Image (cartoon, rainbow, N blue to C red):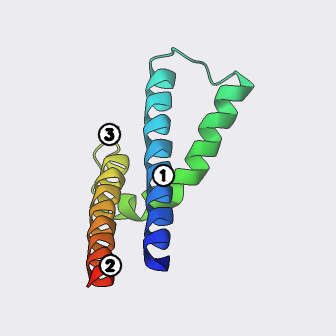
Amino acid sequence: MLTLTIIQILQVILNLVWWIIIVQFVLSLLISFNVVNTSTNFVRSLYEGLDRLSEPLYRPIRRMLPNTGGIDFAPAIVLVLLAILNIVLNNVAASAVMSSTV
């Protein structure tokens, strides 16, 4: 039962990271198209906070990727890795449930 609880906690954390990346992506688009302005303290603080949370995830991926100009593929790769990790956690949870019922 403890294994399932730990897996569920990890899945909540993965979902939180996923949403942080999505919100950061949408906010960066809004800033790029000048829908929102970074001169607003709230927008600037939100963007900088999201950047500080996500940068440790992007940094190792950006080192491995070739320079593609203005397009940053690191967020997309992190989202794919998060989806793969979620699948692995689901399979571990399923096997833990199967082994506990036998």
Tell me if mark 1 has few (under 14), some (14-19) or many (20+) residues whose alpha carbon lies within 10 angstroms of its own: some
Front residue of this view, candidates 54 and 10: 10
Q: Quadrant of residue 41?
A: top right
Q: Is residue 70 above or below residue 33?
A: below
Q: Is residue 68 above or below residue 66?
A: above
* The C terminus lies in quadrant: bottom left
Image point (51%, 16%), residue name:
34
Front residue of this view, candidates 16 and 79: 16
Image point (60%, 51%), residue name:
52
The numbered dot on residue 98 is none
Give the structural element (helix, strand or loop) at label 1.
Answer: helix
Mark 1 vs mark 2: give the one in front: 2
Q: Looking at the image, tell me whether mark 1 or mark 2 is earlier in sequence order.
A: 1
Mark 3 vs mark 1: give the one in front: 1
On the rendered structure, is 78 left or right of 98?
right
Residue 90 at x, y percent in the picture: 30, 65
Tell me if mark 2 has few (under 14), some (14-19) or many (20+) residues whose alpha carbon lies within 10 angstroms of its own: some
The numbered dot on residue 71 is 3
Residue assigned mark 2:
96
Residue 45 at x, y percent in the picture: 69, 35
The numbered dot on residue 17 is 1
Q: Quadrant of residue 37?
A: top right
Q: Looking at the image, tell me whether mark 3 or mark 1 is earlier in sequence order.
A: 1
Q: Is residue 36 above or below residue 77?
A: above
Q: Looking at the image, tell me whether mark 2 or mark 3 is earlier in sequence order.
A: 3
Front residue of this view, candidates 9 and 71: 9
The answer to the question of whether label 1 and label 2 lie on touching residues, with beta carbons closer than 8 A, is: no
Q: Residue furthest front?
A: 102
Q: CA distance from mark 2 to mark 3?
A: 41 Å
Q: CA distance from mark 1 to mark 2?
A: 25 Å
